[in-house]
Amino acid sequence: MRVVLFTGKGGVGKTTLAAATAAHLARSGRKVLAVSTDPAHSLGDAVEAELGGEPTELEPGLFAAHVDTRTLLDGAWARLQDHLGTLLAGAGVDELVADEVTVLPGVEDLLALGEVRRLAESGLWEVVVVDCGPTAETLRLLGLPEALSTYLERLFPAHRRAVRGLISGLATGSREAQPAWDRAVAALDSLAVELQGLRALLADQDRTSIRLVLTPERVVAAETRRTLTALALHGLRVDGLVVNRMVPEAPSSLRGPAGRWLRERHTEQRAVLAELEAVPVPLRVAEYASAEPTGLPGLRELASSLYGSDDPAAPPGTSAAPLMQVHRTAGSGTSPDSAFDLVLHLPGVSSGPVDLVRLDDDLAVTTGSTRRMIALPSVLRRCTVTGAHVNGDDLRVAFVPDPAVWLR
């Protein structure tokens, strides 16, 4: 089973390319589902079909659907919210306050991603192609599983133990109250397992590919480089860039304003493309089509020109460099003159600002508008930060032992 996610800045054609990829894969004999998590669904327009929350068969082997977050909110999440409200009310939290606390921002995105995972792991399809929302929403979406896992663990650490303690200390003694508490604990356990599963699916390169779609414009290319860095910070690898709407080179016989405009535009786009070719990610180019590629025949024609005989769902040939490595740069063993470098591999990190903050045993790394709390390895928890610098695609943070805790 493979999951291929398409995202990019709004208006770059990610929905069309996702639909074209799904149609191309289905024509190769595989059973494929194209699904949209974009709140502004347009996948149905691309395939020229009415779509809903349940997969619709467009042709043999090809299915499509829109994720219906409203139904998901009214279903599983509403039940979980009730259980969380029960837990907080039992701890003495006012009912109205409990209702507000249990409304988590971005939960619709989380439910959409959970539904994609459910569909992917149902065994009904060999490939699931996902039309994600615009880049900003997708970054929030892809970072949610880890962020909410951390939030949940900090809010309810070892929650089974904690809740059992609350029951014995706060419950009124009524036996009827016990099942409600048990259901709240079970709901928290279920959420934690779901978040771990989502995180594992997204980070597994053998199952999941992330493709960034862009147009050959400097502003869009700059955002794409920032997105590469942000995704790498979350431990997620982009294994393909698709440059869409490349203007063809004008023939020498074309004169006048039209010929001049085409040549100037093509030259500008080629310059952007040359910069993108330096990014360490495989790149494909889709030329500007003379007619809007909608409907399955037009989508397959687009995909054929883009992929040729290649398999768009094939996993990357090489493994991505690990997000984090620790290198000893001086000393040995427990020597107090030891020194270490924490190396974070973040493609594109040199093109934007980076902020670092040490918070107890975590290092808060911020690139652009994306922040991640990285748990430090045990040896570095007994060290202090002495500096940091960027070397190519690596952010290197220097540590030396803290004499107060080094030998403890």
Image (cartoon, grey):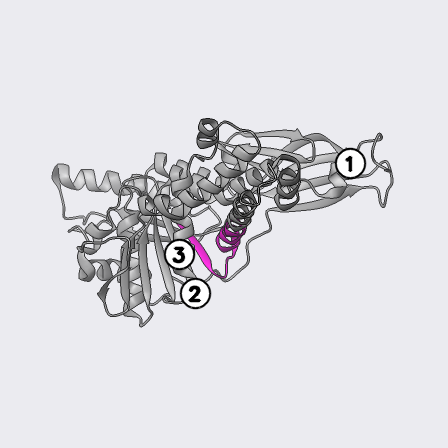
Residue 351's place in the image compared with 24, above or below, is above
SS at mark 2 in the image: loop
Give me the C-alpha separation between circle 3 and circle 2: 10 Å
Report which residue position mark 2 lands on: 1
113, above or below 298, in the image: above
Magenta region: which residues?
A: 193-213
Q: Secondary structure at mark 1?
A: loop
Q: Mark 1 — residue?
A: 382
Q: Quadrant of the image for the C terminus? A: top right
Circles 3 and 2, Cβ within 8 Å, touching? The answer is: no
User: Looking at this view, is 389 or 236 the one in front?
Assistant: 236
Q: Which residue is the site of mark 3? A: 4
Q: Point out residue 18 in the picture as x, y percentages from the top left corner.
A: 31, 54
Q: Residue at x 13, y 42 (%)?
A: 255
Task: Give amino acid for label 1.
Answer: Arg
As drawn, the label of residue 67 is none
Which residue is at the far left? 256
Which amino acid does the dot numbered 3 rest on? Val
Crowdedness of circle 2 by 10 Å Cα count: few (<14), some, many (20+)?
some
Asked which secondary structure carries label 3, the reply is: strand
Work out whether residue 84 or residue 358 is closer to the camera in this orientation and state it: 84
Q: Residue at x 69, y 30 (%)?
A: 387
Q: Are marks 1 and 2 in contact (CB under 8 Å)?
A: no
Gap in angstroms between the C-alphas marked 1 and 2: 43 Å
Q: Earlier in the sequence, mark 1 or mark 2?
A: 2
Q: Going from the N terminus, do you reach mark 1 or mark 3 first? A: 3
Quarter where residue 359 is shown:
top right
User: Magenta segment: does it hold 199?
Assistant: yes
